[in-house]
C-alpha cells in the first residue's frame, strides 16, 4: 500500500473546458441545495431509513458526479460547494484508487458510482472516520493517478481525478512505495459512548457496514448500511426500555468501522453479548427470503454460509483498508478452552433467537448456520450475526424498511436476550455473565 504523492491543487495541467461542463450544469443545484439543505432528505419515502448526518458546519457538499473516458484517460469529476484538499494512493488485490478528503456531505443519487467507464469499473464514497471522507475507485485494469485538481469555479468547485492506463509492473511499483504519511485508524473505540460500568450485562449491537461501505443494495434501492442502522437503533431502544441491560452500538452514525475494530470495541468495553446486524442479497434468486442466524466457526456449515462470510469479510477492502493478520491473536490451551465455551454460549443464544423469531417473522429454510466471520472472532464474548432478510427479495426489502416489522422483530430479539441471560444466571447464579 502506498500514497502516490498526488494532491489536489494548482500543480496539475490546466483544466480542460470539457471537464468543467458537468460543473456548469450543477451550479444552480448547489445554490438550491445550500438555500434548502433539507430538500433531499424531505423527498425520501416515509419508510426510508433516517441517518444522523452530523455534518460539521462548513463541510463541502457534493451534488453531482460524472465519469468519462477519452482514450487512455478516464476522469471522475465531482461538483462541490467549495474546493477540498484531496490525496490519493493505490492498493492491490483488488486494484483500487483511494482518495481521502475532509468530511464531505455526499448528496448524490442513490445509484451514483455503480457504473463506471474506461479504467473505472465502479466507485463508492462516504464517511470513513469522524471529520474524514473517502472515495474508493475500483479499477477495471491497472491505472495511475495522473492528476487531482480541486479549484473554485463560480459559485462552487470542481474536483477532478484523472487516471491513465498503465501496465501491471508500473502499478505494482507505485503501490509498493512507502506512504508519505501514516494512515490514521478509522473510527476508534474511544469515539463510541460506553455505558457506565454496572451490574447489568452489556450488550453490544453492531450495525454492519457504514460510511464508504454501503453493503448490499436492495431491489428498492435502499442500502444495507441504512437498513441495519435503523433496526439497531430500534433494538437498542427496546433493550434499554427493559431496564435490565446496558447497551452500546459499534457505530452511532453513518461511518466506517473495521471488522476487527468492531469486536475489539466490544471486548474493550467488557461486553457480555455481541450481536451483528446485516441484510443479505442473492444475485441468482429473488425468491429466497427470510432471516438467518450465524455463529462463528472455523469451518462453514454449508456453501451458502461460506459464500456470505467471504462476502462480509471483504468489508475492510471495500472501504480501502489493507487487511493485516493480527499477530497477537489469542492462543494456548486456556485460550482454546475459553473459545470453546464461548462457542457453546453463542450457539445457545443463536438457538434462542431462532425460536423467538419463528412465530414473528419469516425465517430462511435453514435459519441456523455458521461460518468464519471476522466480526465474530471475539474469543471471550458470545456472538451472533443476524441476517434480517434478503434485500434481493422484494417482499423482504419492503418489510425491512417498515416500522411495524422492526417493532415486532426487535421485540422478539429482546425476548431471546432475556431467555439467554435467564438460562445462564439460573445455571451459574454466583458467576459473572461473561465467560
Image (spheres, helix red, strand yellow):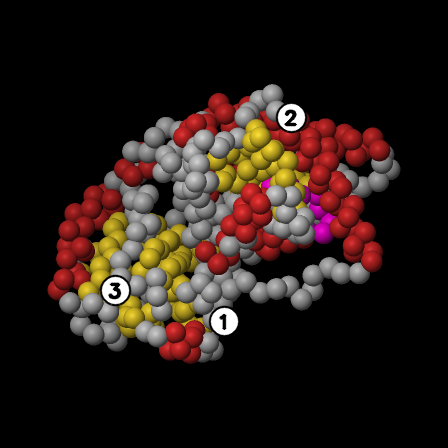
**Front one among 287 and 398:** 287
Quadrant housing residue 171 = bottom left
Secondary structure beneath disc 2?
A: helix
Q: Is 408 in front, or is 387?
A: 387
- The structure residue drawn at horizontal position 43% and vertical position 27%, both measured from the top left corner, is 395
Image x and y of residue 315, in percent: 50, 53
Horizontal placement of 320 versus 24: left or right? Answer: right
Q: In the rendered view, would you say 219 is above or below 187?
A: above
Under tag 1, what secondary structure?
A: loop
From the top left corner, tell me how far across and down residue 163 is, in percent.
29, 68
Q: Is residue 334 magenta?
A: no
Q: Which residue is mark 1?
A: 182
Mark 2 vs mark 1, foreground winner is 2
Q: In x, y percent, where is residue 129?
A: 47, 56
Which residues make up the magenta segment? 378-385
Residue bearing the label numbered 2: 356
Q: Look at the magenta stretch and give its main secondary structure.
A: loop
Q: In the rendered structure, which disc, 2 or 1, sits on the residue that comes first in sequence? A: 1
The answer to whether 387 appears left or right of 99 in the picture is right
Decide: few, some or many residues near mark 1? Use Cα within 10 Å; few <14, some 14-19, many ≥20. Answer: few
Foreground residue among 191 and 344: 344
Residue at 42% x, 75% y is: 172
Q: Position of residue 290 (x, y in %)?
A: 53, 30
Find disc 3 in the rendering and name its residue: 74
Q: Residue at x 26, y 49 (%)?
A: 63
Relative to 326, does residue 37 appear above or below in the rendering?
above
Amino acid at each position: 500500500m502506498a500514497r502516490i504523492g498526488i494532491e489536489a491543487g494548482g500543480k496539475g495541467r490546466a483544466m480542460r473546458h470539457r471537464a468543467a461542463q458537468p460543473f456548469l450544469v450543477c451550479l444552480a443545484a448547489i445554490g438550491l441545495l445550500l438555500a434548502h439543505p433539507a430538500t433531499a432528505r424531505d423527498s425520501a419515502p416515509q419508510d426510508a431509513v433516517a441517518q444522523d448526518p452530523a455534518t460539521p458546519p462548513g463541510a463541502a457538499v457534493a451534488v453531482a458526479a460524472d465519469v468519462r473516458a477519452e482514450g487512455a484517460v478516464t476522469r471522475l469529476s465531482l461538483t462541490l460547494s467549495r474546493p477540498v484538499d484531496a490525496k490519493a494512493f493505490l492498493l492491490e488485490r483488488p486494484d483500487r484508487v483511494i482518495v481521502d478528503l475532509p468530511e464531505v456531505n455526499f448528496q448524490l443519487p442513490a445509484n451514483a458510482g455503480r457504473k463506471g467507464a474506461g479504467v473505472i469499473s465502479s466507485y463508492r464514497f462516504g464517511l470513513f472516520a469522524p471529520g474524514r471522507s473517502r472515495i474508493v475507485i475500483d479499477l477495471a485494469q491497472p491505472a495511475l493517478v495522473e492528476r487531482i485538481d480541486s479549484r473554485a469555479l463560480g459559485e462552487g468547485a470542481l474536483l477532478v481525478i484523472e487516471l491513465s492506463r498503465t501496465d501491471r509492473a508500473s502499478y505494482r511499483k507505485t503501490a509498493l512505495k512507502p506512504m508519505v504519511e501514516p494512515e490514521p485508524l478509522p473510527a476508534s473505540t474511544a469515539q463510541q459512548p460506553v455505558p457506565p460500568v454496572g451490574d447489568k450485562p452489556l450488550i453490544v449491537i453492531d450495525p454492519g457496514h457504514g460510511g464508504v461501505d454501503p453493503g448490499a443494495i436492495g431491489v428498492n434501492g435502499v442500502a444495507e448500511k441504512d437498513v441495519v442502522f435503523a433496526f439497531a437503533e430500534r433494538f437498542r431502544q427496546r433493550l434499554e426500555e427493559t431496564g435490565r441491560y446496558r447497551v452500546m452500538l459499534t457505530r452511532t452514525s453513518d461511518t466506517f468501522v473495521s471488522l476487527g475494530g468492531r469486536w475489539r470495541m466490544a471486548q474493550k468495553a467488557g461486553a457480555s453479548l455481541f450481536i451483528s446486524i446485516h441484510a443479505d442479497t442473492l444475485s441468482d434468486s429473488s425468491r429466497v427470503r427470510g432471516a438467518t442466524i450465524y455463529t462463528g466457526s472455523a469451518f462453514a456449515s454449508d456453501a451458502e454460509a461460506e459464500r456470505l462470510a467471504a462476502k462480509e469479510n471483504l468489508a475492510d477492502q471495500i472501504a480501502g483498508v489493507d487487511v493485516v493478520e493480527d499477530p497477537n491473536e489469542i492462543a494456548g490451551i486456556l485460550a482454546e478452552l475459553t473459545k470453546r465455551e464461548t462457542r457453546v454460549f453463542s450457539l445457545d443464544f443463536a438457538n434462542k433467537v431462532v425460536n423467538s423469531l419463528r412465530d414473528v417473522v419469516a425465517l430462511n429454510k435453514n435459519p441456523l448456520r455458521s461460518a468464519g466471520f471476522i466480526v465474530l472472532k471475539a474469543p471471550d464474548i458470545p456472538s451472533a450475526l443476524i441476517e434480517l432478510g434478503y434485500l434481493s427479495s422484494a417482499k423482504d426489502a419492503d418489510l425491512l424498511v417498515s416500522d411495524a416489522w422492526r417493532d415486532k422483530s426487535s421485540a422478539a430479539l429482546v425476548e431471546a436476550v432475556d431467555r439467554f441471560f435467564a438460562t445462564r444466571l439460573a445455571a451459574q447464579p454466583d458467576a459473572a455473565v461473561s465467560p
